[in-house]
Image (cartoon, rainbow, N blue to C red):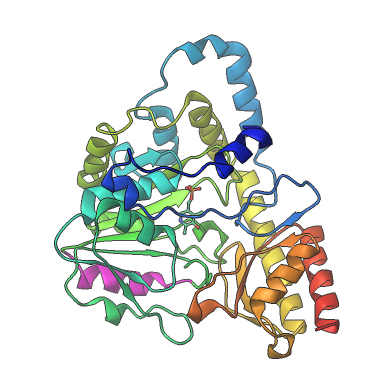
Amino acid sequence: MSNFDQNQINNHQINSRLWSNVVKNLNPYTPGEQPKHADLCKLNTNENPFAPSPKVVEAITQALSNQANDLRLYPAPESDALRETLADVYQLDKNQIFVGNGSDEVLAHIFACFFVKNLPILTPDIGYSFYPVYANTFGVNLQKIALKQDFSLDINDYNQPNSGIIFANPNAPTGILLSLEKIKQLLKNNQNSVVVVDEAYIDFAENPSSAIGLIHEFDNLIVSQTFSKSRSLAGLRVGMAFANPSLIEALNRYKNSFNSYPLDRLAQVGATASLQDHAYFQDCCKQVIALRQDLVKNLMMLGFHVLPSQANFVFAKPPSYCGETKQLFERLRNQGVITRHFDSAKITDYLRITVGTQAQNQRLINALQEILNNP
Ligand SMILES: *Cc1c(COP(=O)(O)O)cnc(C)c1O
């Protein structure tokens, strides 16, 4: 859309006369800014700073040159080849795997399939801000449970009657990881509700921490993951869920009542190629982890309080003498460094900073240094 068209729309009064009440009551998610300006240091939406595996580009290019004619045809509705490769990589059966157009779509289906029930679902008060949006979209009663003072999750707060529990692990935007032992106990305490562990950032944990292995033991567990962060493919839109075949079948029923072909041919080919280049993936994660450790050290040297992160971002509170974090955020932005600030009481003092390349992180640290020197 040209700027002109956009202005025409913006200047035009939106008229909701023909809207349904469903649309009137929606409360849409606001994604982080995707600026057009190339010179900006973009540390605001937790994308991977490194390019995807060259094998991904190769596979997509090849699919286009050899089989462009195939674009006439619908893609594999159940993404069989991709799911088979996922099954290989994660040592699972294909029928324990569901894929969707980004894990956001997978999560939306999860809300529709398992959470539209009488009892509320429970989620931490500080967490991924799409959960309340889905709850509103699907008419789910969502109850927020306060995290502890140090932003950790106490599983004992989740023993009240519920039809589901959902949280990100590592949590967003804190980056804090909940141990597998505690997840196991949570699953034991809630055997009649669906427990969703959103592992969008799990590949950046220093030690293997995924709950995928627990799906054999707990038929009420769903683990979701994405190609957007650790596999550098946010633009391809591929996400997945791992669970017992009965839960996966529910997701399939829903998918096939909504959109039979959520993944296009290129996305299926590209995601499969990404899984096949395991060495590249591992190396990329290792580098991001090392860059995170460096970034944390440098922020602490500037006097920041940094939460212990196992994700590809850090959640950090500036030293108190530099005033409101929101202003710091804006001053950084004026210098071309974009981070994320949340206008929510408990976390208003914090900045969420995506781990960038060495050069990007240095640019952030330099900008912060200058701001702190002129508070
Ligand atoms: C980024 C993110 C997602 C969404 O991932 P997509 O696969 O890009 O839709 C889901 N959950 C959390 C916690 C995230 O940060």
Residue 368 visible? The answer is yes
Q: Position of residue 14 (x, y in %)?
A: 46, 44
Magenta includes 302? no
Chief SS of the magenta region:
helix
Q: Position of residue 337 (x, y in %)?
A: 75, 62
Q: Nearer the viewer, residue 281 or 105?
A: 105
On screen, residue 321 above or below 241: below
Residue at x 22% of width, y 36% of height: 253
On screen, residue 247 above or below 205: above
Q: Position of residue 180 (x, y in %)?
A: 38, 69
Magenta includes 185? yes
For the N terminus, which image quadrant? top right
Q: Nearer the viewer, residue 111 or 263?
A: 111
On screen, residue 244 versus residue 74, left or right, reads: left
On screen, residue 201 versus residue 126, left or right, reads: right
On screen, residue 227 above or below 337: above
For the C terminus, which image quadrant? bottom right
Query: In the displayed image of the protein, which residue is found farthest to the bottom?
Result: 321
Q: Which residues are magenta?
A: 177-191
Q: Position of residue 118 (x, y in %)?
A: 14, 62
